[in-house]
Image (tube, rainbow, N blue to C red):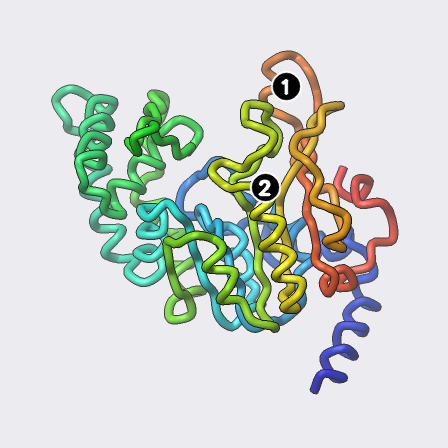
């Protein structure tokens, strides 16, 4: 059986002998669109066609310890690459949104429609309604519909909490958030991909990594320094760099395959430290497009995000030219 798997992998490498061809394949396969629940800052939805060529054609389970809005899981399930999925995030209300969208899409749609519609007739206006929902959320009503509405209405779809754990992101006054009609189009598709195949948790990422078994793929998009220079170089947001490296070393020892979205660059600036060479990872640079911040300053600087591949995944595709050239 293992020999058949290797033969199949070899045959596919003959058919898709470059990352560029695979990227085109996935763009066509996805019809240029990965469904999403709501816009979310840092989402890898737009990079999914560049990331998916580095996944095996078929595998047992996809694990996301830092799921966010689960863009890669949704893209992978859209192509039915994995049999099972685990979504984890320390932000428990985010996980509640994912669980409701996947397991109870009609209930989430009904609850969201009620919250979203209230802003249209709220006496003090839709912005005041946002603050009312935010206060309700911070008082303990952290239901999926409230979290989803705050994400849909807040600036840049960016989750932000104060030091004492209060959601404090401001509303985007230019828009009222995704409409129930558009939400409906996406969440029922997502549910059809993932319902009865997905487990959910909101625990430390290291506990999730201990659940991984050979045959699984772990995709990690940790809260990292990325392409902004506003965070301490020594740490992720609440994640110690050295502890993270130790977790990767443990995955290597146990023979677990993994992919990491990590550091990046913009123009001539490099953000984040490279992961250690002794992990045996391959680093690929993905073109994330023109930097919106640079454009505001009148500059045309391209943002690149790094993708790290564990040893067993480095032969899934064989690029024929340099990756940066492929993705420009």
Residue at the (33%, 25%) spot, across then down: 171
Q: Which residue sits furthest bottom?
A: 1
Q: Is residue 135 left or right of residue 175?
A: left
Residue at mark 2: 241
Looking at the image, residue 160 lies above or below residue 79: above
Image location of residue 313, percent across then percent down: 72, 62
Look at the image and tell me in which quarter the C terminus lies. top right
Q: For this rendering, which residue is in front, 241 or 283? A: 241
Q: Earlier in the sequence, mark 1 or mark 2?
A: 2
In the figure, residue 26 lies in which quadrant? bottom right
In the figure, residue 197 lies in which quadrant? bottom left
Image location of residue 1, percent across then percent down: 70, 87
Q: For this rendering, which residue is in front, 209 or 105? A: 209
Around disc 2, counting alpha carbons within 10 Å, would you say few (fewer than 14), some (14 to 19), or many (20 or more)? some
Q: Which residue sits furthest left?
A: 123
Image location of residue 139, percent across then percent down: 17, 35
Give the numbered dot on residue 294: 1
Looking at the image, residue 312 lies above or below residue 301: below
Q: Which residue sits furthest top?
A: 297
Residue at the (72%, 46%) spot, across then down: 276
State the CA–CA distance, disc 1 to disc 2.
28 Å
In the figure, residue 286 lies in which quadrant? top right
Q: For this rendering, which residue is in front, 267 or 107? A: 267
Residue at the (66%, 68%) spot, across then down: 255
- Secondary structure, mark 2, is helix
- Secondary structure, mark 1, is helix
């Amino acid at each position: 059986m293992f020999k058949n798997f290797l033969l199949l992998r070899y045959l596919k490498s003959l058919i898709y002998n470059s990352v560029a061809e695979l990227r085109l394949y996935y763009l066509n396969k996805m019809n240029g669109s990965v469904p999403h629940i709501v816009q979310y800052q840092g989402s890898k939805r737009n990079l999914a066609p560049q990331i998916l060529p580095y996944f095996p054609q078929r595998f047992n389970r996809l694990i996301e310890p830092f799921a966010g809005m689960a863009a890669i899981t949704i893209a992978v399930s859209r192509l039915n690459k994995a049999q099972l999925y685990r979504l984890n995030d320390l932000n428990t209300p985010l996980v509640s949104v994912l669980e409701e969208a996947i397991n109870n899409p009609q209930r989430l749609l009904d609850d969201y429609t009620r919250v979203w519609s209230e802003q249209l007739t709220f006496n003090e206006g839709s912005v005041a309604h946002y603050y009312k929902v935010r206060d309700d959320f911070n008082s303990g009503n952290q239901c999926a519909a409230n979290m989803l509405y705050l994400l849909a209405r807040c600036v840049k779809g960016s989750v932000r909490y104060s030091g004492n754990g209060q959601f404090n992101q401001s509303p985007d006054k230019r828009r009222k958030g995704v409409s129930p009609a558009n939400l409906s189009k996406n969440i029922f598709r997502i549910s059809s991909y993932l319902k009865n195949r997905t487990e959910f948790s909101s625990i430390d990422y290291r506990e999730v990594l201990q659940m991984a078994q050979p045959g699984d793929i772990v995709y990690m998009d940790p809260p990292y320094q990325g392409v902004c220079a506003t965070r301490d170089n020594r740490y992720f947001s609440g994640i110690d760099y050295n502890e993270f490296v130790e977790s990767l070393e443990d995955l290597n020892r146990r023979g677990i395959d993994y992919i990491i979205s990590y550091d990046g660059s913009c123009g001539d600036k490099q953000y984040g430290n490279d992961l250690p060479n002794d992990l045996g990872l391959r680093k690929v640079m993905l073109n994330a497009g023109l930097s919106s911040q640079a454009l505001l300053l009148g500059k045309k600087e391209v943002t690149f995000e790094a993708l790290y591949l564990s040893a067993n995944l480095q032969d899934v595709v064989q690029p024929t030219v340099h990756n940066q050239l492929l993705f420009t």
